[in-house]
Image: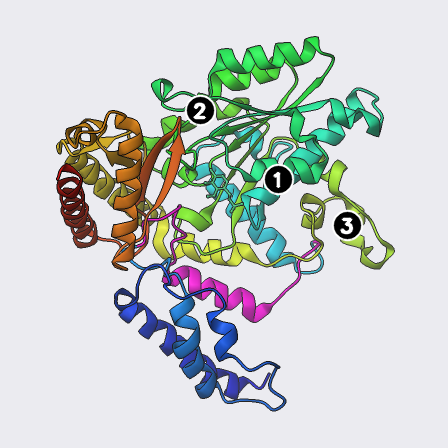
Amino acid sequence: LEPEEFRRQAHLVVDFIADYYSNIEKYPVCSQVEPGYLTKSMPKSAPLKPEPIETILQDVQKHIIPGITHWQSPGFFGYFQTNASTGNFLGEMLLTGFNTVGFNWLASPAATELEMIVTEWILDLLQLPKSFSFSSNGGGVIHGSTCESFVCTLIAAREKKLKQYGAERGDLCKLVVYCSDQTHFSLQKACQVVGISPNNVRSIQTKKSANFQLSPDALLTAIESDVRAGLIPLYLCLTLGTTPTTAVDPLLILSEIAQRYHIWTHVDAAYAGSACICPEFRHFLDGVEGATSFSFNPHKWFLTTLDCCCLWVKDQTDLTNALSNDPELLKNKASDTKQVVDYKNWQIALSRRFRAMKLWMVLRSYGVIGLQQVIRKHVKLAQRLEAQLSADSNFEVVVPRNFATVCFRVSPLMALTTGSTNEDDLANHLTRTLLESLNETGLVYMTHAVMEGIYVIRVAIGATLTDDKHVNMLWDMIQDHASGLLAKYAE
Ligand code: PLP
């Protein structure tokens, strides 16, 4: 790495990215290439000789960009966004520039200490209980994903429970995990990884009439039935902002039930945790004091790019008892004192990125006020879209909006006017067709969810560049496409 040549090439790449952002609205939001498109245009083997950056960037423009789904486009309303920012990019550049591998404190003291500092800052911002702080016996860590946080907390809960019961590994088959049918599907995979039988994952059914929240009665019934059957309740996953509809489970009452049965309660706030830095959304976190662990993804709605998931635990020894190793190769005086955090013992992998650098840059570049403004801007846009949809008899807002995601469908009543006898089936069909036709324009991209057999379009507003004009355009398009569709079916 020759510094002056690095400077020259890096400037070209920065210019390339800046131009990409200037032109982003010219690209179809969701890539329109066919499977295998890239294999056809790429050489069969790696180049033997070095190639100039100019040629490589030309190929990025010609071959890679067509195959990109532009998550940073202001017309991106799919899944949940991962919103980028200048502060984050610069942080990514620095952390890649240093390219440290901070598995323990000594391997990069700044990486460890900055991670402790930013997780404490965010703990304060979210007004999480002090029991999650390093100043008690808790603490925060940055993982790559919520899935990783699920795996680590499940392992911690498993080891603690088996020890508590003096149980053998064979008793693994008795451990039971509770969640709702709205919980993110990665919990199921995490359970598989950790050795929890799929038969022992209670995915408790939720109802539209209860806004898809996990019901305390249903949870209690499931736990009691398992206890009677000689099984061991292990772990409860509650969600603040579910993926299909952004439902919020009633944390207080559910975590109280879990405490009665010594169940580890994890609160997954992957998407909506960010909103809780605004005082007007903080009430959604009420009851989090009953949780054993809590996680949220700055890489969704906190101006931070992948990958970045913050996890806090009340008792750090739960993690370190389950995930520590102490190989000779890594022995050092600082670790021996037990006065430092060695983050390798809080995660699965040994090596770890200096993710705190980008989060610190984001927090410093925008400040709490800047981050709150971003959340409020998106929520306001979603509020307006929700009001427009509610006022139009062609549509039904399927669940009340909590944050900046709106779930709607073609109104089953309008579907009836087309002469159909099964309004829900036809509403599903029309809503799916509407989504396809909107996405085909390439101007916007949304995704769907199905709950209780109801097919809904999810509009997740949260890309950094999304503004009034983009949501206005979306609303115009929704109305146009829906009236065309309904007119066609009424013929
Ligand atoms: N939990 C919720 C509520 C989510 O919405 C998502 C992803 O959208 C996840 C978990 C998975 O997050 P990750 O990709 O960081 O594992």
Q: Say if disc 3 is inside 8 Å of ligand 1.
A: no
Q: Say if disc 1 is inside 8 Å of ligand 1.
A: no
Instruction: Tell me the number on the disc at residue 8.
Output: none
Q: Earlier in the sequence, mark 3 or mark 2?
A: 2
Q: Which residue in the rendered view is the most extreme toward the bottom?
A: 49
- Given the image, on which type of amino acid does mark 3 rest? Ser
Viewer can see residue 140: no
Task: Write the residue at 30% across / 63% down.
Answer: 28
Nearer the camera: disc 1 or disc 2: 1
Task: Write the residue at 44% across / 32% down.
Answer: 127
Q: Picture quarter containing residue 156?
A: top right
Which residue is under mark 3? 335
Who is closer to the viewer here, 457 or 53?
457
Estimate the x, y position of residue 169 in percent, counting from the top left: 83, 29
Estimate the x, y position of residue 64 in percent, counting from the top left: 44, 72
- Given the image, on which type of amino acid does mark 2 rest? Asp
Who is closer to the viewer here, 37 or 321?
37
Which residue is under mark 2? 249
Q: Secondary structure at mark 1?
A: helix
Picture quarter with the N terminus: bottom right
Q: Secondary structure at mark 2?
A: loop
Picture quarter with the C terminus: top left
Which residue is under mark 1? 189
* Residue range (magenta): 76-104
